[in-house]
Amino acid sequence: MKKIFYFIAIFMTFAVGNSYAQKYALIDMEYILKRIPAYESANKQLESFSKQWQSEVDKEVETVDAMYKKYQADLPTLQGSEKTNRENEIVAKENAIQELRNKYFGSQGALFKKQEELIMPIQDDIYEAVKVISTESGYSLVVDRASATSIIFASPGIDISDQVLSRLGY
């Protein structure tokens, strides 16, 4: 009698456990993005803008360096007010350089805005594809393998990255 009771209890445990099982999937965002030509093109554009803006900043830095070297060379002959004026010019130029860096590379700078303009639509498309696949397949959770550092191993069978690419037409 006890054996039958244990058998029924174990059977019920597995039956209830399986009815509430959740389905999980993984994607590899890096893998997906590397296979989207528009993403590579956007990265090249961002790199071009970044180099252009960095070149502009570097020119200004060279200018202020030259001003400082000239100031250092002229220091023994400078009078009080002239010395103060030159120091103020150098400080003002350094502040302008910092503002220029913030304008281009700050948290709300031109590079950030360009990145949003070029890359966000691609990421939004990927998100929508993952959402559709998840809904159709009944996945409760989809984890990005590229950003989830605590995933040590995952079965390749639950990776839906190729399905996402296929859904996007790649």
Image: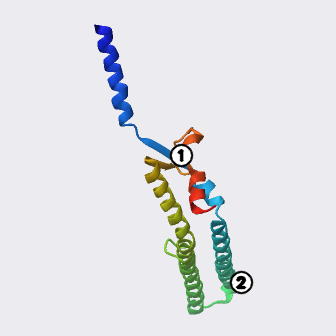
Residue linked to disc 2 = 73
Amino acid under disc 1 = Thr
Q: CA gap, disc 2 to disc 1?
A: 54 Å
Residue 19 % position (x, y): 36, 35
159 shown above or below 55: above
Q: Which of label 2 and label 1 is nearer to you?
A: 1
Amino acid under disc 2 = Ala
Residue 53 % position (x, y): 64, 79
Residue 61 % position (x, y): 66, 79
Using the rendered image of the protein, determine whether residue 28 is visible from the camera's viewpoint: no
Q: Is residue 58 left or right of residue 111?
A: right
Q: Give the quadrant of residue 32.
A: bottom right
153 shown above or below 113: above
Furthest-top residue in this view: 1
Residue 32 or 11: which is nearer the viewer?
11
Kindly identify the residue that appears in the image at 49 percent across and 74 percent down.
108
Using the rendered image of the protein, determine whether residue 24 is visible from the camera's viewpoint: yes
Q: Give the quadrant of residue 165.
A: bottom right
Q: Give the quadrant of residue 87.
A: bottom right
Kindly identify the residue that appears in the image at 34 percent across and 25 percent down.
13
Kindly identify the residue that appears in the image at 49 percent across and 49 percent down.
143
Residue linked to disc 1 = 149
Query: Counting other residues with Cα less than 10 Å from the Cα at mark 2, is it few (<14), some (14-19), or many (20 or more)?
Result: few
